[in-house]
Amino acid sequence: MNPKEVKYIQERANAIMDVIVAYARLDFTQKTEITDQNDVFDAIASGVNMLGEELENSVITLQEREALLQEVHHRVKNNLQIISSLMNLQASYTKDEKFLALIRECRNRIISMSMIHEMLYRTRDLSRIQVSDYIKTLTLSINSSFAGSNSDVVFEYEVDNGICLEAERMIPIGLIVNEAVSNSFKYAFPEGKGIIRIGFSADGTYFCLRITDNGIGLPAEIHTEAFESLGIQLISALSDQLSAELKILRENGLGYELIFRIEN
């Protein structure tokens, strides 16, 4: 696959992901471009746009009724899973490692949002998602995606079981956890062994999300500014959605710390 093809795949996948993120936040006004390529991305884009129109009409008529709003969350979750399945199907037709890696990254992001809507569908309180349950379920899914059942990567959690958040903030948190943990699997452990630690706590005024690994870290000659331009644009953008202060931690591995207010 030449650089032009890789760039095309990245741009199409990112454009579709932007619209899916908007739908996950119940903003159905966004649309993704359909080109004249007639490829799998056009097929997915067409389905995503149709889903947005269907859900927008449903939300307009049902948004005041909580029981039916739960059904909307259920439908969002199901359609996100369908999109994930389409990506899996496309991946089965190629052996190109770069393309497979892109598909996996997009699929993991979709799964992180799908889990939130699954939890919303199952709860009586649509404004509260238990952070500890979500983070543990998500990281196990990422572990399975990268390493399967024989993983030698160990997760250590320090997450307050009493913290619950609304979907609007859980979606960027889930995507941040997905990106940070995925990066650890891809770069931190060349021998396939290591520890990933995830903490989430509150002190009465601020939440603190901390994700670290004990991997090889960044070479000393790579400055944080250069690293940001290459590796953490998405984490930085998602941090802005939370109005969070983001710090990159470089001691004994690599990590991220986000501090944001409890009250929006």
Image: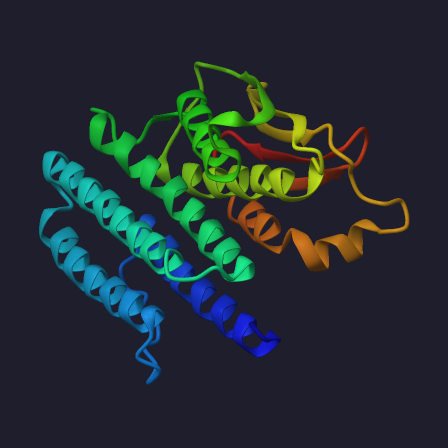
In terms of depth relative to the viewer, which is nearer, 188 or 244?
188
Q: How many marks?
A: 0
Residue 198 image position (x, y, % from top left): 59, 25
Q: Is residue 182 above or below residue 125?
A: below
| Quadrant in which the N terminus is drawn | bottom right
Residue 249 image position (x, y, % from top left): 75, 35
Image quadrant assignment for residue 119? top left
Q: Residue at x 28, y 46 (%)?
A: 81
In terms of depth relative to the viewer, which is nearer, 84 or 162?
84
Q: Is residue 92 left or right of residue 57?
A: right
Q: Is residue 14 above or below residue 63?
A: below
Residue 41 image position (x, y, % from top left): 35, 69
In terms of depth relative to the viewer, which is nearer, 203 or 183?
183
Q: Is residue 89 left or right of residue 223?
A: left
Image quadrant assignment for residue 206? top right
Q: Is residue 208 left or right of residue 81?
A: right
**Direction bottom: furthest residue:** 36
Residue 109 image position (x, y, % from top left): 44, 47
Q: Is residue 187 above or below residue 101?
A: above
Asked whether residue 33 is in view, the answer is yes
**Direction top: furthest residue:** 161
